[in-house]
Image (cartoon, rainbow, N blue to C red):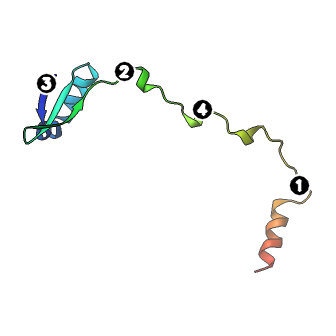
């Protein structure tokens, strides 16, 4: 595990992240004191349930049909102003 300073992380961010993607690990120091570790994450940790891929519960509800049009309802509501 390589040790880098916070300044080096800030200045060479893209190269360091590329190295992490390739499997290298880093210990980040501030004023010589270790404060963080940059390590590649495992494929298991990347699994994410995306809410957009699951259908909401209300999608199975039947659609409602009204006897009056939306414009008639809006006209009625606006008339009360």
Disc marking residue 53 = 4
State the residue position of label 1.
66
Q: Which quarter of the figure is the C terminus placed in?
A: bottom right
1 or 4: tag closer to the N-terminus: 4
In this rendering, the answer to whether 6 lies above or below 47 is below
Query: What's the distance in space between the residues labelled 4 and 2, CA to CA?
Result: 23 Å
Going by the image, does 31 lie left or right of 28? left
Q: Residue at x 79, y 72 (%)?
A: 77
Observer-side mark, 4 or 2, equals 2
Tag 1 secondary structure: loop
Q: Residue at x 13, y 24 (%)?
A: 2
Query: What's the distance in space between the residues labelled 1 and 4, CA to CA?
Result: 30 Å
Q: Position of residue 50 (x, y in %)?
A: 54, 33
1 or 3: tag closer to the N-terminus: 3
Going by the image, does 12 lie left or right of 81? left
Mark 4 Cα within 10 Å, few/some/many (few <14, many 20+)?
few
State the residue position of label 3.
2
């Amino acid at each position: 595990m390589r040790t880098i300073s916070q300044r080096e992380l800030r200045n060479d961010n893209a190269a360091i992240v590329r190295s992490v993607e390739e499997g290298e690990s880093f210990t980040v120091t501030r004023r010589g004191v270790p404060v963080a570790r940059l390590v590649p994450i495992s494929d298991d940790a990347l699994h994410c349930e995306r809410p957009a891929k699951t259908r909401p519960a209300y999608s199975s509800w039947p659609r409602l049909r009204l006897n009056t049009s939306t414009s008639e309802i809006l006209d009625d509501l606006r008339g009360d102003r």
